[in-house]
Amino acid sequence: MNQFTYLALNIVFMLIAFVILNLVSRKSPWRAIGFTMFWMLLITLVFDNVIIALGIVGYDVTKISGLLLGLAPIEDFAYTVVSVMAVAIIWTKVTRSTK
Amino acid sequence: MAQGYTYLAGLILSLMGLALMDWRHKTAFSINKKAASLAIFIPMIFFMIWDVAGIATGIFFRGDTSHLSGILLAPEFPIEELFFLLLLNYSSLTIFTTVSRVIAKRSAK
């Protein structure tokens, strides 16, 4: 388990998320998801840099890829990608079925 | 001592901003309570499992505690993380419904 990297962890969880979302969704609003993704990634870049600069979160440097955007490991953006897709797809599904 | 609540206070302030926008501009819960709850809380549970896996494998951890309240829900899992995940998904939903509205308006023209 010691060699398990952040990237490997993300691949596992992103795969699980995409498989589930693919089963749930039909006709996802990709255009809106795309624009939302852009703004959320931008906000994440700012937010993540602030909390890392303040020392709120730390990473084992031997387990991250080393690709950084400012101070933020590129792997952190996986959370945002999954959040936008999951939130948008669940919202669309539920609002369609309750209307 | 009071400094230990900076991060939590920032998260709660941000959440209050989103709630105000929700109330004023109808962006999430004020449109559909059930859809907003499911869209925010289901991914939140998923992210908590993801977090626990990251903590268990030693990939990330709680940093310098001077900006943290010290309240832990599990080892290396501060209460702030719960509010962060809520903020993450609530932000996604707020931007998504807003963007969807703009797209709908433009295509109606």
Image (spheres, rainbow, N blue to C red):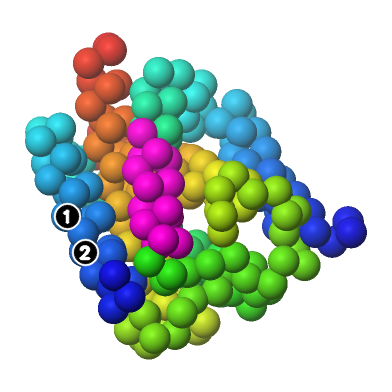
**Mark carried by residue A11:** 2
> What is the x, y in percent for residue B104?
29, 36
Q: Look at the image and say whether residue B44 sits in the magenta stretch.
A: yes
> What is the x, y in percent for residue A12?
21, 59
The C terminus of chain B, quarter of image: top left
Between A19 and B69, the one lying in front of the other is B69
> What is the x, y in percent for residue A58?
55, 74
Residue highlighted by disc 1: A15
Label 2 neighbour load within 10 Å: few <14, some 14-19, many 20+: some
**Mark carried by residue A52:** none
Q: Is residue B69 shown above or below B83? A: below
Q: Does the rendering let one see residue B27?
A: yes
Q: Look at the image and say whether residue A69 sits in the magenta stretch.
A: no
Q: Secondary structure at mark 2?
A: helix
Q: Residue pushed farthest right?
A: B1
Q: Is residue B67 shown above or below B13? A: below
Instruction: Give the residues drawn in magenta, as a range.
Output: B42-56
Q: Residue at x 61, y 52 (%)?
A: B78
A3 lies left or right of B60: left
Q: Residue at x 49, y 47 (%)?
A: B85
Q: Residue pushed farthest top?
A: A99
> What is the x, y in percent for residue B13?
71, 46
Q: CA distance from mark 1 to mark 2?
A: 6 Å
Between B103 and A50, the one lying in front of the other is A50
Q: Residue at x 43, y 46 (%)?
A: B48
Q: Secondary structure at mark 1?
A: helix
- What type is the residue that disc 1 sits on? Leu
Q: Do callouts 1 and 2 mark residues in contact (Cβ within 8 Å)? A: yes
